[in-house]
Amino acid sequence: MSVPLLATAVAWCGAAMGLWLTGLRHRVGPALAFSAGVLLGVTAFGLLPELAGANGWPASLLLFAAGYGLLLAVNRFVYPVCPTCAHDHEHRDCASELHGFGVPLVSAAAIHSFLDGWSIVSVQRAAPLGLRIAVPLAITLHKLPEGIALGGVLRAAVASRGKALLCCGLAEGATLAGAALGIALAPRLGFAWTSYPLGITAGWLFYLGYHAVEEEWRRRGAVPALTATLAGVAGAAVVQRGAEALLR
């Protein structure tokens, strides 16, 4: 549980920064795009090829599509899966508060965090060393700007900083719940079944990364978004190859 706890702590720190540093959320674009690039790089060049080597490309791509499609459906028909990092929600026409926004935002952020925790635990169970390092790193990097955005938006959606901080703690704490459930189910499912949640995880991570890049592109243009994203992809490749070199 040490890695999920670290990711949760990073998110809590980010949320505290978002609550106290008003306006910072509008300057975290490069960090969001960089962390999205890390997610894309880990998925496309690390996690998915490793799964294909173990299970074959047809099964791996099917699981990938299932994970991607699940978050796409939830985002489109239920509520934005990553509202804290992928949407502005500025509500320019509102006088002050984001009316009625707190509960759905916390719910969506909690689902997102739960999936983060499950992903970290799943990859630790069966993946090579490179992925066991790169995937938690990608998620942890994503947690800081996510927490900043969550804190900033919740501050405008609830009545007080204390209540906003409590909501942030609950939403990001779901990371630990997802990790705990993954650990509890692993012995029951067996080692071979780990590849299935890993395949779905690949789709989740790719969706989150792509969605964040797309929104950043729309807000600030192609060059800033792609520059930071490609830097994140390169960073993911360096971490993976470095870990693999240490293993050999």
Image (cartoon, rainbow, N blue to C red):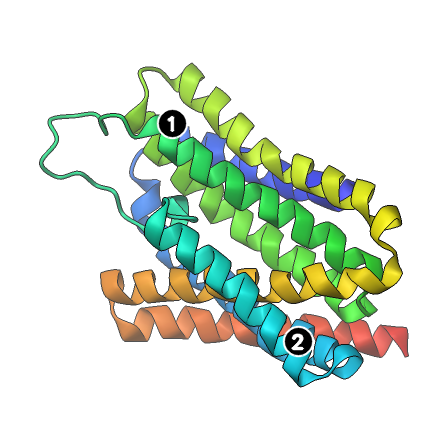
Is residue 21 at all visible to an observer of this figure? Answer: no
Q: Residue at x 70, y 52 (%)?
A: 120
The label number, if any, that marks residue 224 in the structure image: none
Kindly identify the amino acid type of the residue bearing the numbered disc 1: Val
Callout 1 environment at 10 Å: few (<14), some (14 to 19), or many (20+)?
few
Is residue 163 at all visible to an observer of this figure? Answer: yes
Quadrant where the C terminus sits is: bottom right
The label number, if any, that marks residue 60 in the structure image: 2
Q: Residue at x 41, y 22 (%)?
A: 164
Residue mark closest to the camera, 2 vs 1: 2
Q: Residue at x 52, y 41 (%)?
A: 111
Up-down: is 52 above or below 145? below
Q: Position of residue 156 (x, y in %)?
A: 28, 28
Q: Residue at x 66, y 67 (%)?
A: 199
Q: Earlier in the sequence, mark 2 or mark 1?
A: 2
29 or 199, nearer to the observer: 199
Please indicate whether residue 53 sits to the left or right of residue 26 in the image. Answer: right
2 or 13, nearer to the observer: 2
SS state under label 1: helix
Q: Position of residue 74 (x, y in %)?
A: 42, 51
SS state under label 2: helix
Marks 2 and 1, how far apart at CA: 35 Å
Up-down: is 163 above or below 59? above
Up-down: is 184 above or below 124? above
Kindly identify the amino acid type of the residue bearing the numbered disc 2: Ser
Give the number of marks. 2
Please indicate whether residue 191 sits to the left or right of residue 68 in the image. Answer: right
Q: Position of residue 163 (x, y in %)?
A: 42, 17
Q: Position of residue 48 (x, y in %)?
A: 65, 75
Which residue, given by chain and number where applicable, does mark 1 sit on? Answer: 103
